Image (cartoon, rainbow, N blue to C red):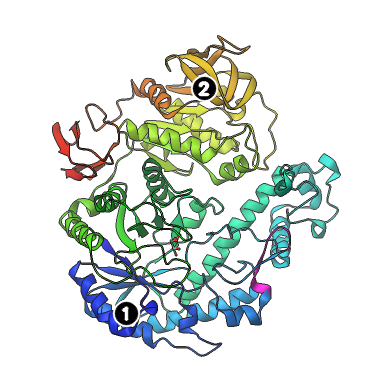
């Protein structure tokens, strides 16, 4: 287990460094991350390098037994470079340059930028590949931050055409697979293909998204692959210049433009940047953070790190709420419970200048260690004592939620019904499982399904025959699957497959969806295993055929027709949920589903706001108990032993 901070020595006078290192050492930190935005400090003008400051600080830290995660600095190309080669800038869909003044102002497909990348990365690799204090490399910083995956410049247009040329045998095949007959969009050659930017139907002026859904999906795949290629170029450069230590990158919870399942394969391990919703704005509630941790574990099905862990109030133009210091410890434990074996706090000291003056670090602007430093130091100490459990046990999940980026992208482009949000649907089902104290993996379909007792495929719309066969085999052999509305009706080209719904899943679900109702935010009545309650967003109107009806609509013209069914298929069972419900109602549905699956629940009676994560190795068991409430609680565990636990507000314990 590693523990440390993101450190920006280049922002502080050298005379301060020894004090910083001393404080870090006293806190028992084992790592710092350095240099992800420091290109100009390393190469102030073209071909004039200065690594002396970096040599000094890596050495000072190393002497104090604190290792370095060294970053390639490509998230912030210097001004001298952008002035010399303005063609590196990204272009938006209106042909505007996304200019200088913040960060990430480069196009992944710019061959000029790729050359400059190779140059700075090989220079760093040559210098530091055998430095014993450098234990990991991080590429760049948060690929995709600020919506920078999609670019519309000429380089991207050219590369997009060659991506399509490699994938489709002929322009005729492309026209036919993607359905270009619609609106006379037939292309007469690969060169005539567009990159899908603004059209006469301009959504920014209140119109709809109008591009061909298949071409749009290809563009999403292409842009994601462009990031893979760029990352690969950096990895190859590091390795060919002698780097042998692990290479990673910091992912983000709410970035959906990169297929992280594919992208994660490039790295030895992955990390992510965790900022719970103390920031005003679209950040994650604490339950969602749990979901994101499980997603991150699922990208490689192995432990991960937090490369930036929130340490305090944050914000750019304004600040968010100040966390109770106990919450900082709680969030660290939450990450570790879900599979993190490294935590790096963002950032060491709050900066006096620049965009992030309000984004507070472990130390305040004045550099004085106060409560946050003390609680982080204490947490680090506790993790050292728990090292055996953290390193040797793993999260044991008998349930998984399956997702895919094709579905993320396709649902995001055509969201079926107002307020339909694929990520939100998955997250609300995950929260239901958290509330039921059931561990859950979040994975793609490449995993071995047989290790799960229950597989949940919410809105799994784009799929293909081989995926469906894999799921069918799993069920036939005794597995249990929950499917929902909007599943199985699109092919990999984002065309509707024309099958009776639920399309590819019709046989195993044992039902016909004969009509549907896009409810938006309107509520309709339902009854059955859900109790008398309401559904929203979507209503599939179902002919249950031979399957068992578990709940029905209780209003609308389809009153008394089924909304939830169960079908026996081979040795296993398939549940179909035709409408969207709130998290407590998903809990009720899942309670029925798991009733004969003997799935491990780690508590005797759930308590609101208390999270438990059960971990196991061959000879050890441990349950992390986290009280997210601002008041004390008592809870009785059933795993690893029957024991009553009392926890103060925001307190945690590990039972083993
Ligand atoms: C992260 C980013 C950091 C810093 C932080 C706070 O997304 O990686 O560099 O900007 O947010 O804004």
Q: Quadrant of the N terminus?
A: bottom left
In the image, residue 308 above or below residue 41: above
Nearest the viewer among 596 and 38 is: 38
Mark 1 packing: few (<14 Cα in 10 Å), some, or many (20+)? many
Mark 2 packing: few (<14 Cα in 10 Å), some, or many (20+)? many
Q: Examine the structure image and report whether residue 88 is included in the region drawn in magenta.
A: yes
Q: Is residue 330 left or right of residue 444?
A: left
Tag 2, which secondary structure?
strand
Nearest the viewer among 321 and 289 is: 321
Q: Quadrant of the C terminus?
A: top left
Q: Is residue 619 visible?
A: no
Tag 1, which secondary structure?
helix
Q: Position of residue 215 (x, y in %)?
A: 71, 48
The numbered disc on residue 58 is: 1
Q: Position of residue 620 (x, y in %)?
A: 18, 44
On the image, which quarter does residue 45 sit in?
bottom right
Q: Nearer the viewer, mark 2 or mark 1?
A: 2
Q: Position of residue 461 (x, y in %)?
A: 59, 35
Start and end of the magenta stretch? Answer: 87-95
Residue at the (20%, 61%) spot, across then down: 374
Residue at the (39%, 25%) spot, across then down: 590
Q: CA distance from mark 2 to mark 1?
A: 57 Å
Q: Is residue 555 left or right of residue 321?
A: right
Who comes first in sequence, dot 2 or dot 1? 1
Q: Position of residue 399 (x, y in %)?
A: 37, 34
In the image, residue 386 above or below residue 473: below
Q: Is mark 2 within 8 Å of ligand 1?
A: no
Q: Is residue 365 left or right of residue 374?
A: right
**Residue farthest to the left?**
643
The numbered disc on residue 535 is: 2
Nearest the viewer among 133 and 201 is: 201
Q: Is residue 198 visible?
A: yes
């Amino acid at each position: 287990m590693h523990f440390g901070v993101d450190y920006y020595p280049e922002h502080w006078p050298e005379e301060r460094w020894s004090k910083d290192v001393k404080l870090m050492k006293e806190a028992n930190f084992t790592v710092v991350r350095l240099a992800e935005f420091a290109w100009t400090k390393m190469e102030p003008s073209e071909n004039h390098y200065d690594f002396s400051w970096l040599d000094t600080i890596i050495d000072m830290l190393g002497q104090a037994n604190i290792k370095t995660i060294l970053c390639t600095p490509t998230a912030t190309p210097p001004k001298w470079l952008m002035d010399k080669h303005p063609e590196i800038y990204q272009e938006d869909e209106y042909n505007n340059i996304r200019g200088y003044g913040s960060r990430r102002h480069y196009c992944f497909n710019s061959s000029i930028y790729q050359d400059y990348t190779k140059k700075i990365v090989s220079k760093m690799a040559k210098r530091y590949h055998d430095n014993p204090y450098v234990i990991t490399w991080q590429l760049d910083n948060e690929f995709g931050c600020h919506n920078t995956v999609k670019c519309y410049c000429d380089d991207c247009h050219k590369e997009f055409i060659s991506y399509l040329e490699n994938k489709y045998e002929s322009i005729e095949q492309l026209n036919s697979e993607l359905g270009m007959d619609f609106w006379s969009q037939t292309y007469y050659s690969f060169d005539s293909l567009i990159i899908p930017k603004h059209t006469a139907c301009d959504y920014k002026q209140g119109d709809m998204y109008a591009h061909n859904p298949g071409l749009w999906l290809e563009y999403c795949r292409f842009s994601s692959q462009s990031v893979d290629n760029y990352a690969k170029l950096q990895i190859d450069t590091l390795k060919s210049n002698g780097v042998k230590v692990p290479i990673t990158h910091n992912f983000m919870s709410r970035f959906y433009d990169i297929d992280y399942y594919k992208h994660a394969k490039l790295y030895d391990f992955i990390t992510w940047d965790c900022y719970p919703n103390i920031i005003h704005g679209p950040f994650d509630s604490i339950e969602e953070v749990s979901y994101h941790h499980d997603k991150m574990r699922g990208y490689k099905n192995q432990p991960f790190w937090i490369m930036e862990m929130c340490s305090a109030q944050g914000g750019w133009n304004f600040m968010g709420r100040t966390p109770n210091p106990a919450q900082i410890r709680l969030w660290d434990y939450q990450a570790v419970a879900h599979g993190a074996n490294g935590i790096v706090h963002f950032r060491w000291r709050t900066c006096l200048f620049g965009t992030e003056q309000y984004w507070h670090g472990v130390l305040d602007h004045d550099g004085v260690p106060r409560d946050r430093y003390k609680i982080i130091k204490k947490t680090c100490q506790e993790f050292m004592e728990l090292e055996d459990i953290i390193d040797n046990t793993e999260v044991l999940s008998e349930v998984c939620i399956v997702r895919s980026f094709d579905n993320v992208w396709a649902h995001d482009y055509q969201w079926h019904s107002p307020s339909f949000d694929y990520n939100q649907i998955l997250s609300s089902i995950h929260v239901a499982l958290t509330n039921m104290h059931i561990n859950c993996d979040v994975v793609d379909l490449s995993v071995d399904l047989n290790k799960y007792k229950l597989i949940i495929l919410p809105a799994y719309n784009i799929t293909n025959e081989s995926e469906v066969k894999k799921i069918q085999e799993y069920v036939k052999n005794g597995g249990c699957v929950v499917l929902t509305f909007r599943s199985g009706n699109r092919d990999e080209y984002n065309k509707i497959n024309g099958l009776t719904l639920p399309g590819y899943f019709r046989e195993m679900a044992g039902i016909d969806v004969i009509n549907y109702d896009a409810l938006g935010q309107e509520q309709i009545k339902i009854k059955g295993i859900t109790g008398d309650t309401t559904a929203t967003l979507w209503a599939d109107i179902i002919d249950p055929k031979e399957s068992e009806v578990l709940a029905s609509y209780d209003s609308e013209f389809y009153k008394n027709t089924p909304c939830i069914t169960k079908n026996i298929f081979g040795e296993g069972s398939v549940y179909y949920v035709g409408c969207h419900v709130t998290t407590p109602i998903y809990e009720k549905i899942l309670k029925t589903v798991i009733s004969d699956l003997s799935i491990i629940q780690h508590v005797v009676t759930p308590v609101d706001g208390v999270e438990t994560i059960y971990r196991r190795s061959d000879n050890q068991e441990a349950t992390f108990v986290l009280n997210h409430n601002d008041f004390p609680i008592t809870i009785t565990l059933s795993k690893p032993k029957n024991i009553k636990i009392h926890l103060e507000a925001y307190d945690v314990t590990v039972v083993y």
